[in-house]
Image (spheres, rainbow, N blue to C red):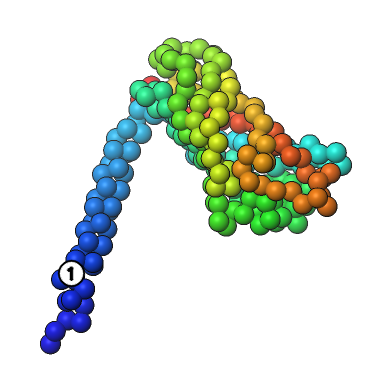
């Protein structure tokens, strides 16, 4: 009995798909191994603190998350951070949090906010010190990327790296629109604060 899929396989369509799938799986496996090895030399965290505030004319809205994940690679002076949007708590009501996720951030579609790139200043991570630095990279919120330079204070002490940063996010930069009916209750620019401690097992 002839396999009904033989013709499709013979002309290469499925074969190419299976080949691409195998290559993809192999690539992911190799990248996973590389990350496991390199992570030993990185500062990492899975429970960083991030909070934001909307200071509008008629209402102050605050929310925070302790689920900020991040890594700093001293060898390359690079960094990457992300947070699950739905992990933010606080707000002034449960309904407000629901509107934040469903109407503004569309967190079912855009699950994470990310910032990754390179620290401009060269740093001696083996020396205990406190420095003012500039982090340049892509800030992705609501599926929209913007290249940003964000100032931060970092403190190196032994195997720990503390990062503190405060910056402003204009909603228009990330295609987040506020209906006119609530324009006096939601600010067009959001204040963001990060305070997180990353650890390195190799220090």
Q: Residue furthest bottom?
A: 1
Which residue is drawn at the image coordinates 59% and 47% (left, top)? 142
- Examine the rendering and report whether any part of residue 29 can be seen: no
Quarter occupied by residue 17? bottom left
Tell me where residue 72 appears, x and y as whole percent. Answer: 44, 28
Which residue is drawn at the image coordinates 57% and 26% (left, top)? 150
Q: Residue furthest right?
A: 58
Which residue is drawn at the image coordinates 21% and 58% (left, top)? 19
Tell me where residue 44 appears, x and y as whole percent. Answer: 45, 33
Tell me where residue 6 appears, x and y as whole percent. Answer: 17, 76
Q: Quadrant of the C terminus?
A: top left
- Tell me the crowding category of disc 1: few under 14, some 14 to 19, or many 20 or more residues within 10 angstroms, Cα based: few
Q: Quadrant of the N terminus?
A: bottom left
93 lies left or right of 37:
right
Tell me where residue 157 appears, x and y as whole percent. Answer: 49, 17
Q: Residue furthest left?
A: 1
Which residue is drawn at the image coordinates 64% and 29% (left, top)? 167
Local SS, label 1: loop
Nearer to us in this view, 2 or 129: 2
- Examine the rendering and report whether any part of residue 3 can be seen: yes
95 lies left or right of 88:
right
Tell me the residue that label 1 is attached to: 11
Instruction: Say above or below: 85 vs 16.
Output: above
Q: How many marks?
A: 1
Quarter occupied by residue 187? top right
Instruction: Say above or below: 100 vs 2.
Output: above
Nearer to us in this view, 96 or 36: 96
Quarter occupied by residue 74? top left
52 lies left or right of 133:
right
Nearer to us in this view, 200 or 143: 143
46 lies left or right of 76:
right
């Amino acid at each position: 009995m002839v396999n009904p899929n033989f013709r499709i396989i013979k002309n290469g369509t499925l074969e190419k798909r299976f080949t691409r799938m195998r290559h993809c799986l192999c690539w992911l496996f190799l990248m996973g191994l590389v990350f496991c090895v390199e992570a030993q030399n990185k500062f990492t965290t899975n429970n960083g603190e991030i909070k934001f505030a909307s200071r509008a004319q008629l209402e102050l809205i605050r929310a925070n998350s302790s689920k900020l994940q991040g890594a700093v690679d001293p060898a390359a002076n690079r960094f990457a951070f992300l947070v699950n949007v739905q992990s933010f708590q606080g707000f002034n009501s449960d309904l407000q949090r629901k509107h934040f996720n469903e109407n503004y951030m569309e967190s079912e579609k855009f699950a994470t906010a990310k910032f990754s790139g390179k620290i401009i200043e060269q740093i001696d991570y083996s020396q205990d010190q406190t420095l003012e630095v500039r982090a340049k990279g892509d800030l992705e919120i609501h599926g929209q990327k913007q290249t940003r330079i964000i100032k931060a204070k970092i403190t190196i002490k032994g195997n720990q790296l503390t990062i503190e940063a405060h910056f402003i996010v204009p909603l228009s930069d990330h295609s987040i629109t506020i209906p006119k009916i609530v324009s006096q209750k939601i600010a067009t620019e959001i204040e963001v604060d990060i305070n997180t401690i990353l650890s390195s097992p190799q220090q």
